[in-house]
Image (cartoon, rainbow, N blue to C red):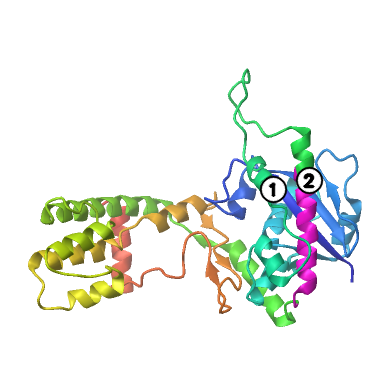
Amino acid sequence: MTALSIDFETRSVIDLDDANVYVLFDHPTTDVWCMAYAFDGEEVELWTPDSEEPPTRVFEHIAAGGLINAWNAAFERNCFNKLMGTRYGWPVPKLTQWRCTMAAAYAMSLPGKLEKAAPAIGVEENKDMEGNRLMKQMMRPRKPRKGEAPGLYWWDEPEKRQRLGEYCKQDVRVERAVGSRLLPLSDAEQKVWFLDQVINDRGVYVDQELCEKSKVIVVEATRRLDAELAEITDFAVTAASNTGAIRKWLAASGLQTDSVAKDVLETLLARDDLTQEQRRVLEIRRDGGKSSTAKIDAMLARRQADGRMRGNLQYHGAGTGRWAARGAQLQNLMRPTESASAVSQIIDMILEGEL
């Protein structure tokens, strides 16, 4: 069966380091620079929005139910679903037409980055890292040049756009070469990957009001803990996050420890020879470690207009074969010590401003 390999290069005000592909393709500024594609072992071709002819052979392949290969297919799949289909009127492939080369690499415990997977598996084709640096520049807006009014500007130099196209084409060559060395996912595992995509597409609901009010509580609790810590240590330690200063103060008070990590803290707190000040400093460090707003910030950054956060799991992301979290870490949420009814009551109190 004929297979199609593709790769898109895009631009947007959305920074993928802070968001993900779902947020990216949901934003109105997101657009495509180009798409590189090839059928089986044929030469790689390039389409751009300025091309005189649409890639009709790609359309025919999609309409016929042909398979589509891509490295990190979630990116290309979202590009079709959210951008090419709606803005450019292209046919949108079904989920079952996609094959993710990165997922197959993960399943063989290979790296998830194309530039690392290629040498690891021993193919001659290598990712164009100079072009990669240009891609990272062109995926974001440029600053207005002298004489230009404030506004949104993209990199429009013809030589840069041509160079980006060559980079995109090389990505297809490397993906195709790596894919030829990989074992395809079994039928059962391919179904698991499809389910993974459905789960990621569906996402989870994020209560924005609860997150924002919870942040206020966490920030205030952190401020109080840090103020108490500063008072106890005579300002030798002013933040529970400063583990080096905590260890230094503990040593000066007669308690030597190489770490104040969670498991070490529990061991130290079980001792019966601690002074009152030492015990309280250790308790503040333990409680302060639970007061980060990073997870809340990550949830809010990835929350979309419908209130849901998507793309939270990576199929086979861990070497052991289990899923890995992406963005907001949802696999290590603290287990409540209170009952479900008590948790519900606490949530209501937070929303009503009673905490």
Residue 199, above or below 78: below
Residue at position x 24%, y 63% in the image? 285
Q: Residue 198 falls in which quadrant of the image?
A: bottom right
Image coords of residue 96 (percent x, y) = 76, 69
Residue 42 lies in quadrant: bottom right
Q: Is residue 110 above or below residue 244?
A: below
Q: What's under tag 2, amino acid-wise?
A: Gly
350 displayed left or right of 12: left
Which residue range is magenta in the image? 164-183
Say whether residue 268 is left or right of residue 329: left
- Give the residue at x 46% y 56%: 299
Quarter of the image with the C terminus in it: bottom left
Q: Position of residue 278 (x, y in %)?
A: 13, 66
Residue 191 image position (x, y, % from top left): 69, 76
272 or 10, which lies in front? Answer: 272
**What SS does tag 1 mark?**
helix
Tell me what residue is drawn at x 15 percent, y 78 percent.
271
Q: Quick check: is 182 in the magenta stretch? A: yes
Report x, y in % for residue 24: 61, 49
Q: Which residue is mark 2?
A: 165
Q: Is residue 179 visible?
A: yes
Q: Nearer the viewer, mark 1 or mark 2?
A: 1
Q: Disc 1 or 2, which lies upstream in sequence? A: 1
Image mark for residue 130: 1
Q: Is residue 105 found left or right of 92 in the rendered image?
A: left
* Residue under the point 58% across and 61% down: 311
The amino acid on which the numbered mark 1 sits, given as a three-letter code, is Glu
Comparing 271 with 77, the one in front is 271
Residue 170 colored in magenta in the image: yes
Which SS class for mark 2?
A: helix
